[in-house]
Amino acid sequence: MRGKLKAKIVVLANQKGGVGKTTTSLNLASALAVKGKRVLLVDADPQGNASSGVGIFNTDNGAQLYSCFMGDLVAENCIRDTGIPKLKVLPSSIDLVGVEIELISLKNREKILRKILSPLRDRFHYIIIDCPPSLGLLTINGLTAADSVLIPMQCEYFALEGLAQLIETIRKVKKNLNPGLYIDGLLLTMFDRRNRLTHQVATEIKTHFGKQVFNTVIPRNVRLSESPSYGKTILEYDRSCSGAKAYIKLGNEFLRRSKVS
């Protein structure tokens, strides 16, 4: 555990939808929390799936990320508890769509999320940001606020499609907005061991990216798909299933890579 808390901020990004980005945000955050780390999950996707995935279905009181972007509330007053004691969430809703429009002419608009999260860094070991499946203003804010990027990739034919664009965006953010940004790794998701193509795609990705690819792979698992509809992470819903075991393994590998003692 870190002696004096200063959160490492990790953004999960991939402009391709359906790659397990929110599933990984939820379950990596919960895996770190059950290992004793203080974790904040930031839902920066207007779909709000990371919020509902930990049981936050109602943000009608305005205590959500959109209010922080608008300057109406500070993040401290928007954080909610989850079913896992050390895991907190900064929730979101469809209102967040407005950020892309309302802040378009604002100076330093790419740095707003960094400013929002800065006062929270001494409260957590990790801050995990779930971004929308796009490379718009919200994702750029996530990349600018973060120390590192984790890229989930589905093991399918089009897995590498758009990856070059994402890496180029990361490079531009690093050059112009966030010099310390680096890629934590690529995570293979929805791995079907019975599917020959899955193995071919995984081999190709590992050939291209080598040690940047996490050793842990996330399998296709029905229980993983079910758990968000109950407002629970997979570690609350069914810790014995293959999906839960994979995310526990990912949490351990992530901690080793982060060199946190």
Image (cartoon, rainbow, N blue to C red):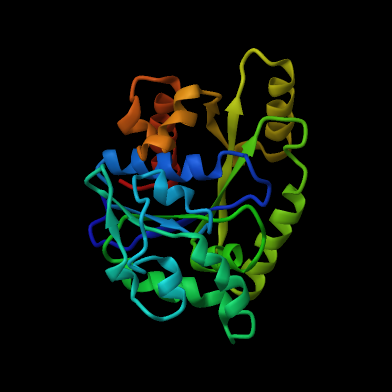
Residue 195 visible in the displayed image: yes
Above/below status of 162 relative to 221: below
- Residue 200 occupies quadrant: top right
Residue drawn where x is 56% and y is 63% of the image: 143
Give the residue displayed 77% in from the left and 31% down from the top: 157
Residue placed at 43% from the left, 37% from the top? 228
Residue 180 shows up from this direction: no
On the image, the x and y values in percent for residue 7 come to 35, 60
- Residue 154 falls in which quadrant of the image? top right
The single residue placed furthest to the top in the displayed view is: 194
Taking the spot 57% from the left edge, 57% from the top edge, the residue there is: 182
As drawn, which residue projects farthest toward the front? 60
| Numbered disc total | 0
Residue 230 is situated, as x and y percent measured from the top left of the image, at 37, 35
Q: Nearer the viewer, residue 125 or 117?
A: 117
In the picture shown, does residue 54 fall above or below 58?
above
- Compared across the picture, whether 82 is left or right of 243 comes to left
Q: Nearer the viewer, residue 139 or 105?
A: 105
Relative to 187, does residue 6 appear above or below in the rendering? below
Relative to 27, 207 lies left or right: right
**Percent x, y for residue 102?**
58, 79
